[in-house]
Image: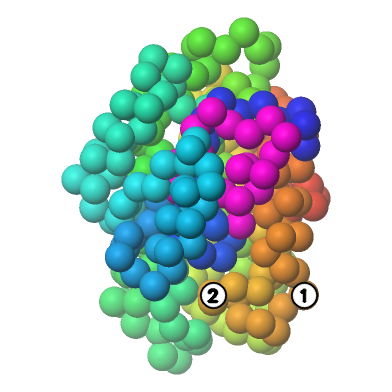
Amino acid sequence: MEKLHVQSVLVTGSNQGIGLGLVSQFLEKPNPPEWVFATSLDLEGPNAKKLENLALQHPNLVVLQLDIRDLKSIEAAVQRVEEHVKGNGLTLLINNAGILVKFTHLANETAKNMYDLYNTNTVGTLQVSQAFFPLLKVAAQRSLQEGLSCSKAAIANIASDFGSMEEVIGWGLSQVISYRCSKVAVNMLTRCQSLEYGPLGILCISIHPGWVKTAMGTCLVPTTVTESTSGILKVLSDVTEKDAGSFLDWKGRVVPW
């Protein structure tokens, strides 16, 4: 993990669960980033206090309001980040924000539910990546590193093995059609980003965080937030140009498309 030297990182959806865990992991590193940007949909919500307390302990933590479905909100967040990083750009963007509204199956899936999840999980990830691309490009251009790495410039999209079309993980446990479809689309987005942004020095990957004990993941799963997020940081420290556009889990294993 010490191979990961990130000057700045932004994590969406970081007021709880995996997002909050990732922010905490970066802040606790022996070589923490100069800036850690944590975003939350609602800065007045019940979970916002956790970020506020962290910010009091870590002056390099900046808490931002961000609705990944709202372009004006995204543009405002980009401006705030730019004010802090100045001409150095943004090193790492972790698209973590996402939703799982209902545990649906084919018989009761609805167009509205499909739209809501696709709009947040997929379109939101696209919009945030597009908006922060100029800052990621600046970081890549300023870096003296050869090849691609998360210490140079990178986008990590938090995906799910529920988006694996080859294995269709957990079908007997939960169909969640809309969630699966939205995460398949995120994986395709990652591949497209890798083809477009890779030649510009930006590494793009999808990461499955495991079945984690969060509000979304429920308590009936084997992996803790700490285990997942520490694993994700190790993956981020190890990935190189050969991993660009790939789908990995929190232990660094390839997840079938």
Q: Is residue 40 visible?
A: yes
Q: Secondary structure at mark 2?
A: loop
Q: What separation in Å lies between label 1 and label 2 (alpha carbons)?
A: 14 Å
Which residue is rendered at x = 50% and y = 85% of the image? 103
Under mark 2, the amino acid is: Met
Quadrant assignment for the N terminus? top right
- Which region of the structure is painted magenta? 21-38
Color scheme of the displayed model: rainbow
Q: Residue reaching furthest front? A: 56
Name the residue tied to disc 2. Answer: 216
Q: Secondary structure at mark 1?
A: loop
Could you say which disc has been placed on residue 71 in the image? none
Residue 212: x percent and y percent? 67, 69
Name the residue tied to disc 1. Answer: 222
Q: Earlier in the sequence, mark 1 or mark 2?
A: 2
10 Å neighbourhood of mark 2: few (<14), some, or many (≥20)? Answer: some
Residue 30 highlighted magenta (yes or no): yes
Image vertical order of residue 180 relative to residue 4, above or below: below
Image vertical order of residue 127 relative to residue 237, above or below: below
Under mark 1, the amino acid is: Pro
The residue lying toward the viewer, choosing from 79 and 137, is: 79
